[in-house]
Image (cartoon, rainbow, N blue to C red):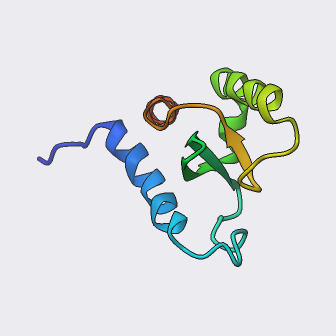
Amino acid sequence: MGFRLPRVANAKRLLQRSFSNANRAASSPIEDVPKGYLAVYVGEESNMKRFVIPVSYLNQPSLQDLLSQAEEEFGFDHPMGGLTIPCREDLFVDLISRFNAR
């Protein structure tokens, strides 16, 4: 009987795709986001990481709080051209892994 990986590993695997996409040229950023997902940028302004998350996560109250902070900080002018969330990368990965644990 095999063992199951922790759900955090599943979250990292889900987000790993976005890390590999972050290194691609930005010529066609919409093409690499699957239907039902959206790209968000997280981290410090000098070191933003791109994550691709399911749209269903937008219903989560904790993510809605982050989006409210993004609205206050950036309004509709996001420096990366996409949705920018003012949150440390490690905290965001932890938050997403908790969504996957449900």
The residue drawn where x is 50% and y is 29% is 95
Left or right of residue 76: residue 73: left
Who's the residue at 69% across and 53% down the image?
Answer: 38
Left or right: 8 as drawn, with respect to 91: left
x then y, percent, for residue 71: 82, 31
Residue 61 spot, x, y in % from top left: 69, 21
In the depicted structure, whether residue 55 falls above or below residue 36? above
Task: Provide residue 63's location: percent of width, then percent of height.
Answer: 66, 28
Q: Residue at x 60, y 43 (%)?
A: 45
Residue at the front extreme, as displayed: 46
Question: What residue do we see at 54% from left, 74% from top?
Answer: 24
* Quarter occupied by residue 42: top right
Number of numbered discs overlaid on the protein picture: 0
Residue 68, image x, y percentages = 78, 25
Name the one closer to the observer, 45 or 39. Answer: 45
In this orientation, which residue lies closer to the viewer: 46 or 14? 46
Q: In which quarter of the image is residue 65?
A: top right
- Note whether 12 is above or below 34 in the view shown: above
Q: In this view, does 68 lie to the left or right of 26?
A: right
* 10 with respect to 61 (left or right): left
Seen from this angle, which residue lies furthest right? 76
Vertical placement of 8 versus 55: above or below?
above
